[in-house]
Amino acid sequence: MSFLSGRSLAKSYFITKSLWYKEEIRAVHEVSIDLDLENEPGPDRKGGNVGLVGESGSGKSTLARLLSRLERPSEGSLYFQEKEIGYLPESLLLPFRREVQVIFQDAAASLNPRHSVEKILSEPLRNFFPGLKRKERLERIAEILHQVGLSPDHYSRFPHEFSGGQKRRLAIARAVIIHPSLLVCDEVTSGLDVSLQGQLLNLFLELGDKFGVHYLLVSHDLPAVRYLCRRILVMYAGRIVEDFPVADTGSSVHPYTRALLESEPVLDGSFSPRFLPGEPPDPSAYPPGCPFHPRCRERKALCSEVQPGLKKVGENHRAACHLV
Ligand SMILES: Nc1ncnc2c1ncn2[C@@H]1O[C@H](COP(=O)(O)OP(=O)(O)OP(=O)(O)O)[C@@H](O)[C@H]1O
Ligand SMILES: [Mg+2]
């Protein structure tokens, strides 16, 4: 049984261009995935963590919002522990929200500036565990503050009294205090200096060990994804084009994935990255056939005519490409 599954998920936005014309932006389409969180943690501690990568505009955040039911899909189904939840009203989503929490890059901005740390961290406990006594709540708050590296003396402080890195830790504490099974993280390490990024990734691993939290890490940062995740999903033009185990980055078969991996700079300068020429397609007018074919060095005639489906190409490995 999968923890969370999408079947042919799609999301379109409509932008008013004139009185008579609305343009359809197809942000996500035909996405079918299973997130099984059961993978054994193993010595690398990565468990069932999944990374979601792709260029800007490829639909990563939209897919993350669909999987965390912050938005309803336009088409398709979302199953949480085998139950369809894609179109349920918010009032029926409580069991799902208890297990699936979300944090965004601007998580710090979502902390209410007028609420103290105690109030910020009490709120999710009150919502999801209304039976807890005040003493138990305070114990849980002290525990989570300690876990995320903030001092228990920070109880009565307000968000503006923290640094940017500390605010992110507080936002993580707020999401993890209810011990969810999955934390969807959209670019949470972006815009931080390298040492803070590393600290947050290690914090994620520690919270995974301690509370059994798994992650869906949406990121531009391939090294971060490699560090935290065991599986990578690659998005292009609103679709998943490859789904493969991190351990085998050398085995990626999609020309787009290989171009992404080749464009990754190496710090010691021993290798000069090759950047992928061209632009991703306009989401209101995808080209016929494979959406990547105009930029693909290896395209064949078929690629401009027929859209390749996501097929199994090996153990735990799927790719959408006519060349494989
Ligand atoms: N609320 C919205 N209204 C209209 N269009 C939207 C909306 N949200 C996203 N889009 C469009 O959907 C497409 C996918 O956007 P999305 O934010 O999912 O991409 P992304 O992969 O997360 O990009 P980035 O890496 O820059 O965060 C883009 O073309 C974007 O302009
Ligand atoms: Mg995004």
Image: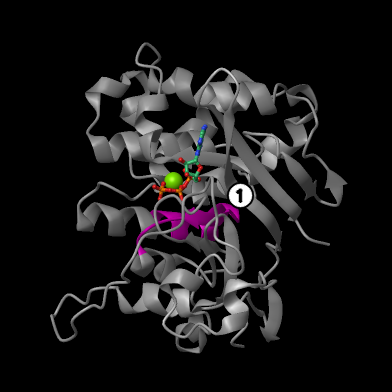
Q: Quadrant of the N terminus?
A: bottom right
Who's the residue at 35% across and 18% down the image? 156
Q: Is mark 1 within 8 Å of ligand 1?
A: yes
Q: Is residue 20 above or below residue 42?
A: above
Residue 214 within the magenta-colored segment of the rendering: yes
Who's the residue at 49% across and 26% down the image? 121
Q: Is residue 128 above or below residue 264?
A: above
Percent position (x, y) of residue 93? 75, 31
Q: Which residue is at the front of the view, 198 or 295?
A: 295
Task: Specify start and end residues of the magenta stretch as a single range.
Answer: 203-221
Q: Which residue is at the front of the view, 299 or 110?
A: 299
Percent position (x, y) of residue 194? 21, 58
Percent position (x, y) of residue 48? 61, 66
Q: Is residue 121 above or below residue 319?
A: above
Residue 223 within the magenta-colored segment of the rendering: no
Q: Which residue is at the front of the view, 278 or 81?
A: 278
User: Is 186 on the left-hand or right-hand side of 8?
Assistant: left
Query: What type is the residue that disc 1 sits on?
Result: Val
User: Is 5 on the left-hand or right-hand side of 244?
Assistant: right
Which residue matches tag 1?
A: 28
Q: Quadrant of residue 86?
A: top right
Q: Quadrant of residue 179?
A: top right
Q: Which residue is at the front of the view, 282 or 245?
A: 282
Q: Quadrant of the C terminus?
A: bottom right
Percent position (x, y) of residue 206? 45, 58
Who's the residue at 32% across and 28% down the image? 153
User: Is 209 on the left-hand or right-hand side of 98?
Assistant: left
Q: Is residue 204 above or below residue 305?
A: above
Residue reaching furthest top? 114
Who's the residue at 31% across and 49% down the image? 190
Q: Is residue 176 visible?
A: no
Q: Is residue 159 visible?
A: yes
